[in-house]
Image (spheres, rainbow, N blue to C red):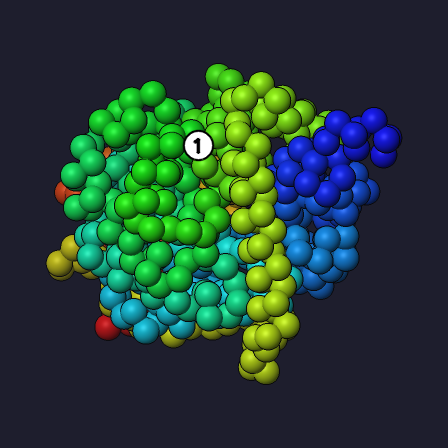
Amino acid sequence: MSQQSTADGLRGPGGLRELAAGVLLPGFVGTTLPQWLAERLRNGLAGVCLFGVNIVSRSQLRALTDEIREANPNALIAIDEEGGDVTRLYQSNSSPYPGNALLGRIDDVTQTEFIAGIVGWELRLAGCNIDFAPDVDINSNSDNPVIGVRSFGADPAVVARHAAAWVRGLESTGTAASAKHFPGHGDTAQDSHLALPVVDLPLAELRRRELLPFVAAIAAGARTIMTSHILLPQVDPFAPATFSRIILQDLLRRELGFDGVIVTDALDMIGASGSIGIPEAAVRAVAAGCDLLCIGTENTDEQLGQIEAALVSAVEEGRIEREVLRVASARTLALGRELRADAERIPIPEYVTADDEPVFDDAATRAAFDSRPGLVVEKERRFVAIETVANIAVGQSPWGPAAAGADVLEVREGQQVELPAGAQIVIVGKDNHRRAWTRDLIDSVRQSHPSTLVVDMGWPSDDRAYADVATFGASRHVGRALLAWLEGEQQ
């Protein structure tokens, strides 16, 4: 560190560079902590976000989080563990949890709170202290390509009470919850990973519907709220939610009274940085009132240097008030210290171990399936799994009957498939109605094999045209429940 840089106020305690580092939450490549990232953590980097590519085993993950915490004892170590289709702890073998859509259909808040608590204890064992969950979006659009079964449902009251239950369960373990994606990503037909969705709703409608789960999550004690990269032209016609002071300051801070950490959804998403780049996205997010910037999955030392430099320049040029950056960095550091104290104060129960995977009875899951009356399930069956491009939030993970151990025949777009004779064809897919080629495939198989049974393990269309059975989830737990359902265990 040079004397000149300290004199300039760029480095050292309270310097602009340190303040900038204190709001950054990057991802990285690898299963061990890179030296450059360890050095940044020692110099005040807020923390890291972990993804499936960073995890090969529980013991390796714990060693990694120990490395992170050794470099910065107050580090925020975040992960997306939603307890269903979106999983990082179980990305290699699929989640043992039912997922939000099924929990909403079961509608037992005690069960929802219990499952969230188990997730929280698992994360505590792994050394993670922020869970980017629950997803409290209201899935009011069945064509939504990114939320779907990650939502507790389409009814605002159901979503609100399960959002509160999930937050209570998670926060009780000393793990910080992050209700997402503010102010609501459910009524979209685009994925903000790939575009900038528009939700053209008036503020009065948001208050009546989208905001209710966030109000419930805040009241339940959620310590962070994650923003969405969506444009709401009737609220702020110029800036997506992540960059909007109207949405983050006037609505979230003042009207809803949230005083915790506002964290961005990943800034490497097209909806945030597609036309302006990540450094500029970081500047706009902090200027709008975000405290913690989730950068992405494969960030580098050079990239973080560019983001820090952009934030410093923005302060020097007057685009961001120094006090705004200072408050954001201080709020993030305070959360890190609080979570560190929680880990020391709240013991992990003896019944929670890293060696034993949670197992849940699937009777309630089976009862929550939606099936056509009079379906005939034959004794001899052959599974055909429709493999589509994975949702970026979900990532590559086993799903459905295959994750539960069944033998499946996979079919992809443009692929010719020979179907076996003498067995009932059971087609399993996710969001079957959303793609022309999957609809055509199902129509063709139904015509050639009239006894075909079609299962949608995503969010089906309202008319259920391509879902003889809708499971509202595709985790390993749900796959196991489907196999039992097909064997006649339908109650």
Name the residue rendered at 58%, 23% in the picture: 314
Q: Visible in this render: residue 280? A: no
Name the residue rendered at 79%, 33% in the picture: 6
Q: Left or right: where does residue 392 sit relative to residue 220?
A: right
* Nearest the eye: 204 or 91: 204
Image-quadrant location for residue 346: bottom right
The residue tagged 1 is: 288
Name the residue rendered at 29%, 69% in the picture: 109
Picture quarter with the C terminus: bottom left
Image x and y of residue 471, in percent? 30, 55
Numbered circles on residues, count? 1
Image x and y of residue 403, in percent? 49, 56
Image-quadrant location for residue 40: top right
Q: Visible in this render: residue 347? A: yes
Name the kind of residue labelled 1 in the image. Ala
Give the structural element (helix, strand or loop) at label 1: helix
* Nearest the eye: 380 or 253: 253
Position of 13 relative to 130 (above/below): above
